[in-house]
Amino acid sequence: MKILCAWIIAVSVTLTASAQELGKTFQKTCGFCHQSGVAGAPKIGDKAAWEPRLKKGIPALVESVVSGKGAMPPKGLCATCKTEDYRALINYMAAQ
Ligand code: HEC
């Protein structure tokens, strides 16, 4: 039982740390445009702006970021982001 509790605590600490990491990555990359809606970027937390885009499905949205779309440069300024990071960042923006 003690071992299980320690494991649960360790997992929840890891999750909190990664949520903070996500916020930091967002601010340094996507947030540059998606925070205020530069050049027509769908703003963080703007459900009306995100809803029609989410209907395309997350894989299609990740693809838009990786190859660039309109005023958004390829990779969305995040040179080190992987597919999972883009997924997490998109969910982060759409769900705030
Ligand atoms: C230089 C500004 C800029 C940066 C940086 C940026 N975006 Fe964007 N993003 C835009 C603009 C502008 C659009 C709207 C493009 C359009 O629909 O013409 C957009 C659209 C999107 C869309 C919707 C794509 C679609 O197919 O409808 C997603 C998803 C997205 N951005 C995710 C991200 C993520 C994740 C990051 C960070 C890794 C990021 N963006 C960084 C400007 C930016």
Image: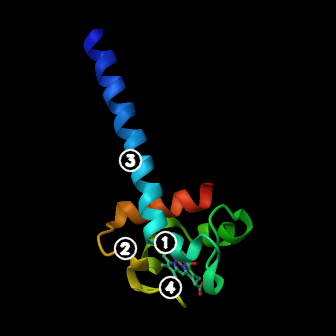
Provide the secondary structure element on which disc 3 rests: helix
* CA gap, disc 4 and disc 1: 9 Å
Q: Earlier in the sequence, mark 2 or mark 1?
A: 1
Q: Is mark 4 within 8 Å of ligand 1?
A: yes
Q: Earlier in the sequence, mark 2 or mark 3?
A: 3
Q: Amino acid at mark 2?
A: Cys
Residue 30's label in the rendered image is 1
Q: In the visual, does 22 lie left or right of 1?
A: right
Q: Earlier in the sequence, mark 1 or mark 3?
A: 3
Residue 18's label in the rendered image is 3
Q: Position of residue 2 (x, y in %)?
A: 28, 10
Q: Is mark 1 within 8 Å of ligand 1?
A: yes
Q: At x 37% / y 34%, what residue is drawn?
A: 13
Identify whether 20 is placed above or below 53.
Answer: above
Q: Find disc 2 in the rendering and name its residue.
A: 78
Callout 2–callout 1 Cβ contact below 8 Å: yes
| Quarter of the image where one finds residue 44 | bottom right
Provide the secondary structure element on which disc 4 rests: loop
Q: At x 36% / y 60%, what residue is drawn?
A: 84
Residue 72's label in the rendered image is 4
Q: Is residue 66 visible?
A: no
| Quarter of the image where one finds residue 87 | bottom left
Identify whether 71 is placed above or below 57.
Answer: below
Callout 4–callout 1 Cβ contact below 8 Å: no
